[in-house]
Image (tube, rainbow, N blue to C red):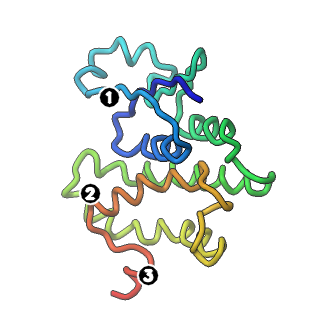
Amino acid sequence: MFPTSQTLSLVPGHCEAMRMLLADQGQSWKEEVVTLETWGRGPLKASCLFEQLPKFQDRDLALYQSNAILCYLDRSFGLYSKDQQEAALVDMVNDGVEDLIRCCSHLLHNYEKGKAQCAQELPGDLKPFEFLLAQNKGGQGFIVGEQVSAGSGPSQPIVSIAQKSNLRLGAEADRE
């Protein structure tokens, strides 16, 4: 469906939700991995709207901002939501995950120092997501709705950070 090119973000995991969504829908795509050295030279950065990555190209449409890209993909595949209420929950989860990513960004700059802070704060930061998940089929479904969507994919960077940090989350942390 998509003859796409995706330029990856410099932040690990930031494009993982897009990759998951495209793979789930059986789509192929082309990725261009950008190194810090290439980004630092400037021409690519200057060519990007907001001077940020990721960039997602679909024919003549170039999108920036990961949430906008996810929403575009969801709508393209008919996954966004079944109604306005579910759409609002998807939007809320996306915004919450972006906030959480910003809170954990210190791990990128000083992993060893940031790991302890993240281990202390992340279980509390994840409580709203655990609450939403529990509300949907007792935690046995997706965080929002009945199918993969922008509301279920963005949590992947947080899970990756937690796994990399060997953090215990949710019920596992409560048992300790």
**At 56% from the left edge and 27% from the top edge, which residue is drawn?**
2
Residue type, numbered disc 2: Gly
Label of residue 33 in the image? 1
Q: Is residue 38 above or below residue 107?
A: above
User: For the residue carrying disc 2, how many other residues have a C-alpha within 10 Å: few (<14), some (14-19), or many (20+)?
Assistant: some
Rounded to the nearest angstrom, the CA distance separating label 1 from label 3 is 36 Å
Q: Residue furthest bottom?
A: 175
**At 38% from the left edge and 46% from the top edge, which residue is drawn?**
13
Label of residue 114 in the image? 2
Q: Nearer the viewer, residue 163 or 25?
A: 25
Quadrant position of residue 68? top right
Please say if the residues under marks 2 and 3 sit with CB atoms less than 8 Å apart: no
Rounded to the nearest angstrom, the CA distance separating label 2 from label 1 is 25 Å
Residue type, numbered disc 3: Ala
In front: label 2 or label 1:
1
| Picture coordinates of residue 160, whole percent (x, y) | 35, 56
Which residue is label 3 attached to?
171
User: For the residue carrying disc 3, how many other residues have a C-alpha within 10 Å: few (<14), some (14-19), or many (20+)?
Assistant: few
Horizontal side of 122 relative to 79 (left or right) equals left
| Picture coordinates of residue 121, whole percent (x, y) | 39, 67
